[in-house]
Image (cartoon, grey):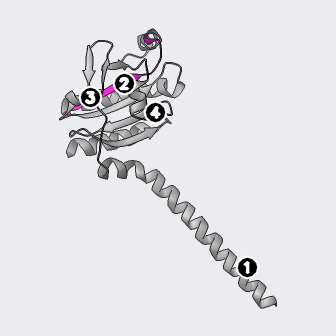
Protein backbone atom coordinates (compact mmCIF):
# COMPACT_ATOMS: atom_id res chain seq x y z
CA UNK A 1 0.00 0.00 0.00
CA UNK A 2 2.78 2.40 0.92
CA UNK A 3 4.62 1.85 -2.36
CA UNK A 4 1.50 2.68 -4.37
CA UNK A 5 1.12 5.96 -2.45
CA UNK A 6 4.75 6.80 -3.30
CA UNK A 7 4.09 5.94 -6.96
CA UNK A 8 1.01 8.17 -7.02
CA UNK A 9 2.96 10.99 -5.35
CA UNK A 10 5.86 10.57 -7.77
CA UNK A 11 3.50 10.47 -10.74
CA UNK A 12 1.62 13.59 -9.61
CA UNK A 13 4.96 15.35 -9.00
CA UNK A 14 5.95 14.59 -12.60
CA UNK A 15 2.58 15.93 -13.80
CA UNK A 16 3.09 19.13 -11.83
CA UNK A 17 6.62 19.45 -13.18
CA UNK A 18 5.31 18.83 -16.68
CA UNK A 19 2.57 21.40 -16.19
CA UNK A 20 5.00 23.97 -14.76
CA UNK A 21 7.34 23.28 -17.65
CA UNK A 22 4.53 23.86 -20.11
CA UNK A 23 3.57 27.10 -18.37
CA UNK A 24 7.18 28.30 -18.43
CA UNK A 25 7.49 27.35 -22.10
CA UNK A 26 4.24 29.17 -22.89
CA UNK A 27 5.41 32.37 -21.17
CA UNK A 28 8.83 32.25 -22.80
CA UNK A 29 7.16 31.85 -26.21
CA UNK A 30 4.69 34.60 -25.36
CA UNK A 31 7.45 37.08 -24.60
CA UNK A 32 9.70 36.10 -27.49
CA UNK A 33 6.73 35.96 -29.87
CA UNK A 34 6.89 39.73 -30.07
CA UNK A 35 10.06 39.48 -32.17
CA UNK A 36 9.13 36.26 -33.99
CA UNK A 37 5.87 37.76 -35.19
CA UNK A 38 7.69 40.74 -36.67
CA UNK A 39 9.99 38.46 -38.64
CA UNK A 40 7.66 35.65 -39.71
CA UNK A 41 3.95 36.49 -39.92
CA UNK A 42 2.46 38.24 -42.93
CA UNK A 43 -1.17 39.36 -42.79
CA UNK A 44 -2.46 42.14 -45.05
CA UNK A 45 -2.96 45.33 -43.03
CA UNK A 46 -6.41 46.85 -43.31
CA UNK A 47 -6.29 49.95 -45.51
CA UNK A 48 -7.75 53.21 -44.22
CA UNK A 49 -7.84 56.93 -44.85
CA UNK A 50 -8.04 59.44 -42.02
CA UNK A 51 -7.78 63.20 -41.65
CA UNK A 52 -4.53 64.33 -40.07
CA UNK A 53 -3.47 67.36 -38.09
CA UNK A 54 -1.11 68.89 -40.67
CA UNK A 55 -0.95 66.55 -43.66
CA UNK A 56 -4.53 66.46 -45.03
CA UNK A 57 -6.10 63.04 -45.51
CA UNK A 58 -3.62 60.17 -45.27
CA UNK A 59 -4.11 56.67 -46.60
CA UNK A 60 -2.13 53.67 -45.37
CA UNK A 61 -1.99 52.13 -48.85
CA UNK A 62 -0.08 55.20 -50.09
CA UNK A 63 2.77 54.19 -47.78
CA UNK A 64 3.61 51.01 -49.70
CA UNK A 65 7.39 50.84 -49.87
CA UNK A 66 7.73 52.21 -46.33
CA UNK A 67 7.61 50.52 -42.95
CA UNK A 68 4.74 52.10 -40.98
CA UNK A 69 4.19 52.00 -37.25
CA UNK A 70 0.53 52.69 -36.47
CA UNK A 71 0.00 53.75 -32.89
CA UNK A 72 -3.54 54.04 -31.53
CA UNK A 73 -3.58 56.43 -28.59
CA UNK A 74 -5.75 58.78 -26.55
CA UNK A 75 -5.08 62.00 -24.65
CA UNK A 76 -6.47 60.50 -21.41
CA UNK A 77 -4.06 57.53 -21.59
CA UNK A 78 -1.00 57.98 -19.34
CA UNK A 79 1.04 55.18 -21.03
CA UNK A 80 0.26 56.81 -24.40
CA UNK A 81 1.70 60.12 -23.20
CA UNK A 82 4.78 58.30 -21.91
CA UNK A 83 5.25 56.45 -25.20
CA UNK A 84 4.92 59.40 -27.64
CA UNK A 85 8.43 60.85 -27.05
CA UNK A 86 9.96 57.41 -27.70
CA UNK A 87 7.99 57.13 -30.91
CA UNK A 88 9.35 60.53 -31.95
CA UNK A 89 12.88 59.21 -31.37
CA UNK A 90 12.11 56.24 -33.64
CA UNK A 91 10.74 58.59 -36.29
CA UNK A 92 13.85 60.76 -36.17
CA UNK A 93 16.19 57.77 -36.27
CA UNK A 94 14.59 55.86 -39.18
CA UNK A 95 12.61 58.37 -41.28
CA UNK A 96 15.35 58.64 -43.92
CA UNK A 97 15.34 54.85 -44.35
CA UNK A 98 11.69 54.56 -45.40
CA UNK A 99 9.93 54.55 -42.04
CA UNK A 100 7.05 56.61 -40.72
CA UNK A 101 4.59 56.64 -37.87
CA UNK A 102 0.85 57.16 -38.09
CA UNK A 103 -0.30 58.22 -34.62
CA UNK A 104 -4.04 57.50 -34.67
CA UNK A 105 -5.80 59.46 -31.97
CA UNK A 106 -9.11 57.97 -30.82
CA UNK A 107 -10.47 60.89 -28.78
CA UNK A 108 -13.99 61.93 -29.77
CA UNK A 109 -12.82 65.55 -29.63
CA UNK A 110 -9.58 66.14 -31.63
CA UNK A 111 -8.90 69.34 -29.67
CA UNK A 112 -7.94 67.17 -26.66
CA UNK A 113 -5.18 65.58 -28.71
CA UNK A 114 -4.10 68.95 -30.09
CA UNK A 115 -3.80 70.35 -26.55
CA UNK A 116 -1.64 67.41 -25.48
CA UNK A 117 0.55 67.81 -28.56
CA UNK A 118 1.38 71.37 -27.50
CA UNK A 119 3.41 69.78 -24.68
CA UNK A 120 4.61 66.69 -26.51
CA UNK A 121 5.83 67.75 -29.94
CA UNK A 122 5.98 65.12 -32.68
CA UNK A 123 7.02 65.34 -36.32
CA UNK A 124 5.09 62.31 -37.53
CA UNK A 125 1.49 62.53 -38.78
CA UNK A 126 -1.25 62.57 -36.15
CA UNK A 127 -4.51 61.18 -37.55
CA UNK A 128 -7.97 61.44 -36.02
CA UNK A 129 -10.25 58.41 -35.70
CA UNK A 130 -13.15 60.23 -34.04
CA UNK A 131 -15.73 57.59 -35.05
CA UNK A 132 -13.50 54.61 -34.14
CA UNK A 133 -13.75 53.24 -37.69
CA UNK A 134 -10.06 52.38 -37.97
CA UNK A 135 -9.86 51.25 -34.35
CA UNK A 136 -12.58 48.72 -35.13
CA UNK A 137 -10.74 47.58 -38.28
CA UNK A 138 -7.72 46.78 -36.13
CA UNK A 139 -9.77 45.46 -33.18
CA UNK A 140 -8.18 47.95 -30.79
CA UNK A 141 -9.09 46.95 -27.25
CA UNK A 142 -6.25 48.50 -25.26
CA UNK A 143 -4.55 51.88 -25.16
CA UNK A 144 -2.08 52.26 -26.62
CA UNK A 145 -2.08 49.63 -29.36
CA UNK A 146 0.78 49.48 -31.82
CA UNK A 147 0.77 47.82 -35.23
CA UNK A 148 3.80 47.64 -37.50
CA UNK A 149 3.25 47.25 -41.24
CA UNK A 150 6.00 46.14 -43.61
CA UNK A 151 6.95 47.68 -46.97
CA UNK A 152 4.49 45.35 -48.76
CA UNK A 153 1.51 46.45 -46.64
CA UNK A 154 1.47 43.40 -44.37
CA UNK A 155 0.75 43.68 -40.66
CA UNK A 156 3.79 42.17 -39.00
CA UNK A 157 3.38 43.11 -35.36
CA UNK A 158 0.51 43.82 -32.99
CA UNK A 159 1.28 44.99 -29.48
CA UNK A 160 -1.31 46.00 -26.88
CA UNK A 161 -0.44 48.36 -24.05
CA UNK A 162 2.85 50.01 -23.22
CA UNK A 163 5.44 49.62 -20.52
CA UNK A 164 8.92 51.04 -20.36
CA UNK A 165 11.19 49.00 -22.62
CA UNK A 166 8.57 48.24 -25.29
CA UNK A 167 10.17 50.89 -27.49
CA UNK A 168 13.28 48.68 -27.73
CA UNK A 169 11.10 45.89 -29.12
CA UNK A 170 9.57 48.30 -31.62
CA UNK A 171 13.04 49.40 -32.68
CA UNK A 172 14.16 45.79 -33.19
CA UNK A 173 11.09 45.04 -35.31
CA UNK A 174 11.49 48.21 -37.38
CA UNK A 175 15.19 47.52 -37.99
CA UNK A 176 14.42 43.96 -39.09
CA UNK A 177 11.67 45.09 -41.45
CA UNK A 178 13.78 47.88 -42.94
CA UNK A 179 16.43 45.26 -43.81
CA UNK A 180 13.93 43.11 -45.73
Residue 125 higher or lower than 162, as above or below: above
Q: Dots 4 and 2: beta carbons under 8 Å? A: no
Q: Residues within 10 Å of mark 4 (few under 14, many from 20)?
A: some
Q: On the image, numbered disc 2 is attached to which residue? A: 103
**The disc label shown at residue 115, or none:** none
> On the rendered structure, is 174 left or right of 13?
left
Front one among 57 and 99: 57
Q: On the image, numbered disc 1 is attached to which residue? A: 9
Point out residue 88 in the picture as x, y percentages from the top left corner. 35, 25
**Marks 3/4: CA–CA distance:** 17 Å
Q: Which residues are magenta?
A: 98-110
Viewport quadrant of the N terminus: bottom right
Q: On the image, numbered disc 4 is attached to which residue? A: 140
Q: Residue at 49% x, 18% y: name it.
A: 75
Q: Residue furthest right?
A: 1
Q: Residue furthest left?
A: 65
Local secondary structure at mark 4:
loop
Residue 51 higher or lower than 92, as above or below: above
Does the magenta segment cover residue 105?
Answer: yes
**Earlier along the polypeptide chain: callout 2 or callout 1?**
1
Do we see residue 95 in this rendering? yes
Point out residue 89 in the picture as x, y percentages from the top left corner. 34, 28
**Marks 2/1: CA–CA distance:** 56 Å
**The disc label shown at residue 60, or none:** 3
Local secondary structure at mark 2:
strand
**Earlier along the polypeptide chain: callout 3 or callout 4?**
3
Point out residue 104 in the picture as x, y percentages from the top left corner. 38, 24
**Earlier along the polypeptide chain: callout 3 or callout 2?**
3
Amino acid sequence: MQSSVKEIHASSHVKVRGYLGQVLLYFSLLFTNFNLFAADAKVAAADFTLASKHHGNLRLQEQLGNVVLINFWASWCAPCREELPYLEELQQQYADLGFTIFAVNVDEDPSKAENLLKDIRVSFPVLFDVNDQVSKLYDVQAMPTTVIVDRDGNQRLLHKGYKSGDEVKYQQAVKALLRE
